[in-house]
Amino acid sequence: GLGLASLVAPDTGEPCVVVDDQGGIRLAGVVLQASKAPTAVLLRWGGPGSSENPSVLSDVFARVGGPGSTDVRADVMAEVSASHVVLDNVWLWRADHSELAPGETPRPGEQYHLVVTGECACDNGLVVDGDDVVAYGLAVEHTERDQLIWNGERGRVFFYQCELPYEVDQAFGDAGFAGYKVAPNVTKHASVAPGVYSYFRDHRCYVDAAVVAPDTAVFVNAFTKKLRAHEGILATIVRTGPPASWRYWLPAVVARWFGLA
């Protein structure tokens, strides 16, 4: 198999990787891992970016928990504030299970420790503040607040896979957290094939929507899926902000599917 370098967050609380993107940067084949030191973000991708020479992240993975202790924390796994960045196969995972502690007995039928509230703390998987960011194959799983927050303009996502956290109770739903959230002031956004899954293992939890976005964001073939256990996601998409005309920038194929071309 392909070996991937693992970068563990330093004890100083600094990120694993900090980028000042002036264009043409490549980051590939790396795992970013939270440590016991509280960390604001594991990957901070800043700078202006470049439309003429976009930077690319390929096969970049992050994890909060899994191996070793559950006493780890990263507020956000990845933050992209530069523009014109391409995300190519990025998976951001807060652990739903981890190695057993010495002498620990797993729950019946399980082989691992099942992560509960207060362990492997992480608020968000990905926060995008840059404009013209595109993602091909993006996955965010199990964070304790919104999984994905997209604040930048003209974002595009092609395939998105998300699982909401397993252990949460109704407080998660009452807070309005979602699997995919586009800021209400965003005027142009497109997403093809986003899927948000639920497996509310320990408690019943009703979440208003898998996706929360303004009318100015277009979603193609968005879906939800209950894997098992308790209910449940109540709607696929809930709209925020004022109604929009829907005649705005879109990839050509999406425009044709919606009869806008």
Image: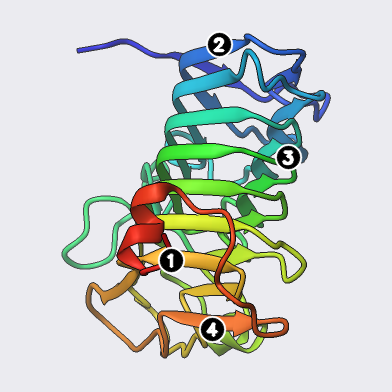
Pick whichever of labels 4 and 2 is earlier in the sequence: 2
Report how far apart the C-alphas of labels 3 and 2 lie in the structure: 17 Å
Dot 3 and dot 4 residues touching (CB under 8 Å): no
Camera-side mark, 2 or 1? 1
Q: Which residue is mark 3?
A: 130
Structural crowding at the residue carrying mark 4, measured as other residues with C-alpha within 10 Å and reported as few (<14), some (14–19) or many (≥20): some
- At mark 3, the secondary structure is loop
User: What residue is shown at x 65% (from left), y 15% (from top)?
Assistant: 52
Residue that carries the numbered disc 2 in the rendered image: 26
What's the residue at 67%, 48% (across, down)? 127
Residues under numbered marks 2 and 1 in contact, where contact means CB atoms less than 8 Å apart = no
N-term mark: 2 or 1: 2
- Side of 61 where 23 appears, left or right: right
For residue 63, say whether it is visible: yes
Q: Which residue is mark 4?
A: 238
Q: Amino acid at mark 3?
A: Gly
